[in-house]
Amino acid sequence: MSSEMAPPIDDDKVFKALASATRRRILDQLKDHPKTTGEVCAAVDDLDRCTVMQHLRVLEQAGLVIPQRKGRERWNHLSVLPIKHIYDRWISEYASPAVEVLSRLESDLNQ
């Protein structure tokens, strides 16, 4: 087992990767289970294989997709850690007060 640590998450690369609707579609394809590159290409059938591979490369560079070779196949696994990092840093801090406001509003309406 390797003792190397995972590279730090680059927010700019993650946001750039998530900015594309096509890349979000690809991530949606991987959220339930890993898929081969051929399966991903079939699911994004409005693009040619080369273009899908370019999108997968951007996702991989952002740490959102982890490729694994098994024989001749390339399996693409979703990595949720960069998304969790974005959530923890940018969303959770703002979500908590919003949930409190909604809770108070619900409480006030029920009185």
Image (cartoon, rainbow, N blue to C red):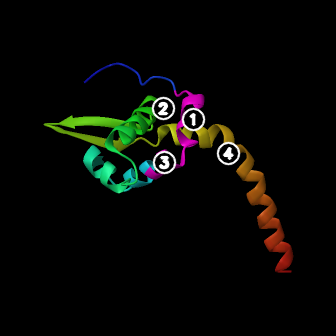
Residue 6 location in percent, x, y? 42, 25
- Say which label, 4 or 2, has the lower sequence index: 2
Q: Which residue is at the front of the view, 11 or 2?
A: 11
Label 4 with label 2: CB-CB less than 8 Å: no
Q: Is residue 111 above or below residue 6?
A: below
Query: CB atoms at circles 1 and 3 under 8 Å apart?
Result: no
Q: Which mark is residue 16?
A: 1
Residue contact between numbered discs 2 and 1, judged by CB atoms under 8 Å: yes
- Seen at 40% across and 21% down, the residue is 5
**Given the current orientation, which residue lies at the most extreme bottom position?**
111
Give neighbour class at mark 4: few <14, some 14-19, many 20+ (Cα, 10 Å): few
Report the mark closest to the observer, 1 or 3: 3
Pick the residue in front: 97 or 7.
7
Label 2 crowd (10 A; few <14 / some 14-19 / many >=20): many
Q: Residue at x 31, y 36 (%)?
A: 67
Between marks 1 and 4, how big is the CA–CA gap?
17 Å
Q: Amino acid at mark 4?
A: Ile
Mark toward the start of the polypeptide (2 vs 3): 3
Q: Which residue is mark 2?
A: 62
Disc 1 marks a residue whose amino acid type is Lys
Residue 47 sits above or below residue 69 on the image: below
